[in-house]
Image (cartoon, rainbow, N blue to C red):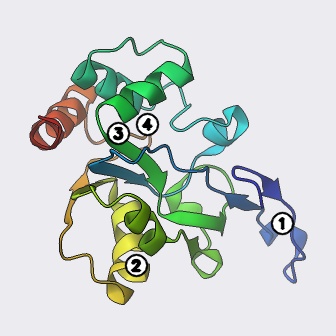
Amino acid sequence: MPSGIITSIACLKPPEFCMPTIYCFEPIANHQAEILILGSMPGQASLSANQYYAHRQNAFWRIMAELLQFNPEAPYEEKTEALKSARIALWDVLKSCQRQGSLDAMIEKESQTVNDFQSFFRIHPKITRVFFNGGKAEACFKQYILQRNNFSAIQFTRLPSTSPANARLSFADKRKMWHQLLITGIR
């Protein structure tokens, strides 16, 4: 199934309780990647734009632009190239799920399938640090991936979600925490 595609599924529940199945994007990565940033699943704005973190109020690209010194309004291809130049890969923990809307809290737990991280880390052997963009990404990774695999050479760290739904932290607080934790991995 192509990434980002939303499909209808046969649902045995009443129609108002049926959710579409959504699929993540392909990873943004090259073989030089040393850092992997993981989200849970793209939101509706990202799925519509076919771009990671496309929601205008998501802080991800503004934070990364300041950290890596690129224009946050640059075309998407330039932003993803800036990540790859900094040896940063980007992907999602979930391969597919059923979710109404964009909130992680709306993901139907029984519908979650995860990406193949054994193959990903085999193809990207230089990755030594994984940063989770929020709690859902970390929880899914720990539940479905870490329990079944040995990634002892990799350090895992949760960062605050850059989503606008994470309103408990200001942009300045999110930026400060991301910069403090990411800067050591980049330099």
Q: Amino acid at mark 1?
A: Glu
Residue 70: % across, % down? 34, 14
The residue shown at (71%, 58%) is: 22
Asked if the residue at tag 3 contacts the one at tag 4, i.e. Cβ–Cβ closer than 8 Å, the answer is yes
Q: Is residue 125 left or right of residue 14?
A: left
User: Which residue is label 2 attached to?
Assistant: 145
Pointer 1 with pointer 3, Cβ within 8 A: no
Report the amino acid beneath label 2. Ile
Instruction: Single out the mark in the foreground, 4 or 3.
Output: 4
Residue drawn where x is 29% and y is 32% of the image: 86
Residue 164, numbered label: 4
- Distance Cα–Cα, label 2 vs label 3: 28 Å
Q: Is residue 150 left or right of residue 84?
A: left
Nearer to us: label 4 or label 1: 4
Of badges 2 and 3, nearer the viewer stands 2
Residue 180 vertical placement versus 77 (above, below): below
Asked if the residue under mark 2 is in contact with the one under mark 1, i.e. CB atoms within 8 Å, the reply is no
Q: Which mark is residue 167?
A: 3
Q: Amino acid at mark 3?
A: Ala
Quadrant in the rendering for residue 58: top left
- What amino acid is at disc 4? Pro
C-alpha gap between disc 4 and disc 3: 6 Å
SS type, badge 2: loop
Label 4 and label 1: CA atoms lie apart by: 26 Å
